[in-house]
Image (spheres, helix red, strand yellow):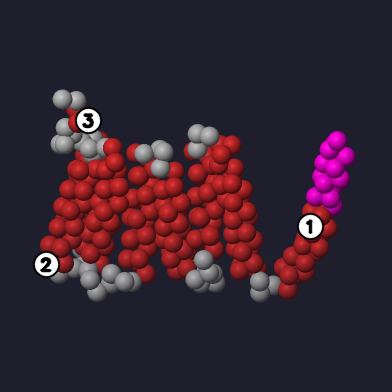
Amino acid sequence: MKANDNFFFWRTGFVGTALILSGIFFLLTNFSIIPPVGQATERVIGILLFVTGIVFAFFQGRGGGLFWFIIPAGVSFSFGIVILIFGFAEIIGTLAAALLSFGFGTTFLIIFLLQRAQWWALLPAGSLYGLSLWIWMSMLQPEIGFHPVFLVLSIGLSFLAVYLFSVQKHKMRFSLYAGAIIVFCAFIYYFVILFSKFILFWAILLIIVGISVPLTFLILNKRLLKKEADTP
């Protein structure tokens, strides 16, 4: 019987990493480097979620079509960490939401790293990382507030990552174009938020738009005329 046909065959690297990181987390909480806040019952539930995540990680290690077991494993680990740190009282708080989003994003990133053919996993990974970054930046930069500029930026970067890591790049050009447009719009959105209070900004923006729009139409018109001239 081949090793891959054995039901208990699993990738020691993935499961071993999950066990090591779990052990490190519990050491940090034991020495109060990461102070747990929850009550005894909440800690038990958090530990059970860790065990559940390890079980899912074990069965995912069989490979094949079981790679999707990474999703419940990552969800279990993420909820376990949040419950152990914040408890049930703060589980719907902003910091807990940021940590959960980061954990879910890492889950989809691991799917891509283990199964490179699953390029779609980069899109939810980038979106969830963007959601986590959005929450953090809304607290670090009050002037931005809850404008989803960092979420938009992360989604654009996700599309660019799909193109960058794709094997057949000519089939993924849509991802390159979509990512470039979204990233460009995100930067414009960011600068508008930061400088919208300054009258000088709007004057400069109007000048840039006034130059860019006719210039763009001029370039497109020349390309169309050249294409028509080359057509027999």
- The 10 Å Cα crowd at callout 1, few under 14, some 14 to 19, many 20 or more, is few
Q: Which of 151 and 138 is in front in this view?
A: 151
Q: What mark, if any, has residue 212 been given in the picture?
A: 1
- Amino acid, disc 2: Ala
Give whichever of discs 3 and 2 has the lower sequence position: 3
Give whichever of discs 1 and 2 has the lower sequence position: 2
Residue assigned mark 3: 4
The residue drawn where x is 73% and y is 70% is 202
- Amino acid, disc 3: Asn
Q: Nearer the viewer, residue 128 or 137?
A: 128
Q: In this view, does 41 lie to the left or right of 89?
A: left
Residue 109 against residue 89 in the figure, above or below: above
Q: What mark, if any, has residue 40 been given in the picture?
A: 2
The x, y position of residue 69, in whole percent, is: 26, 48
Q: What stretch is highlighted in magenta?
A: 218-232
Residue 34 visible, this angle: no
